[in-house]
Image: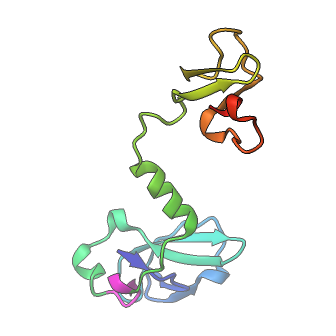
Amino acid sequence: MQFKKIHEACTAQGGSVKAADMSLNVLFNYSCPSCGNLLRLHWTHTEGRYFTHILEQANLTTLINCEYIIPAGSAKPPTPFSTAVQETLQRDNSTLGFPVAERFMCVMCNHEYDGLKMCPLCQDTMYTTEVKNRDTQALPQWFAK
């Protein structure tokens, strides 16, 4: 369940309080004017002060009928960052961060091999490249084979 930001709350005595007028050290409990559940004061530099529902202490039967609830179909679309995080979490984590064995070629000794990026003949990594990245048009035919 998602809720809109609430800018005005009810006090225990029945009065109303605006979030913009509140100090950040809240000592009293404030409730939602619509459903009566407890609210928490938030403050950000971009959006200022506002109240949100304390969902851990809320009564679900009254929350469903709250006027500040956002219907399920009208929620904001996910941000590109949250989409990327979800895709990363759904990917197989077994190969993340580990080198993958590929087909390499040493330019120094013209040796093709499988495995990690180190030529088994000359023990060099600086002149080793992936076979799939080799430019066959710039090389002589005998070398490109």
Quarter of the figure with residue 121: top right
Tell me if residue 71 can be seen.
Answer: no
Residue 103 position (above or below residue 90):
above
Quarter of the figure with residue 86: bottom left
Residue at image coords 42%, 79%:
3
Q: Position of residue 9 (x, y in %)?
A: 49, 84
Q: Is residue 5 left or right of residue 112?
A: left
Coloring basis for residues? rainbow
Q: Position of residue 106 (x, y in %)?
A: 69, 22
Q: Position of residue 83 (x, y in %)?
A: 49, 63
Quarter of the figure with residue 31: bottom left
Q: Is 70 in front, or is 99?
A: 99
Residue 103 position (above or below residue 78):
above
Q: Is residue 35 left or right of residue 80?
A: left
Residue 72 position (above or below residue 107):
below
Q: Quadrant of the C terminus?
A: top right
User: Where does the magenta region start and end?
Assistant: 66-73
Residue at image coords 55%, 29%:
103
Q: Is 110 in front, or is 96?
A: 110
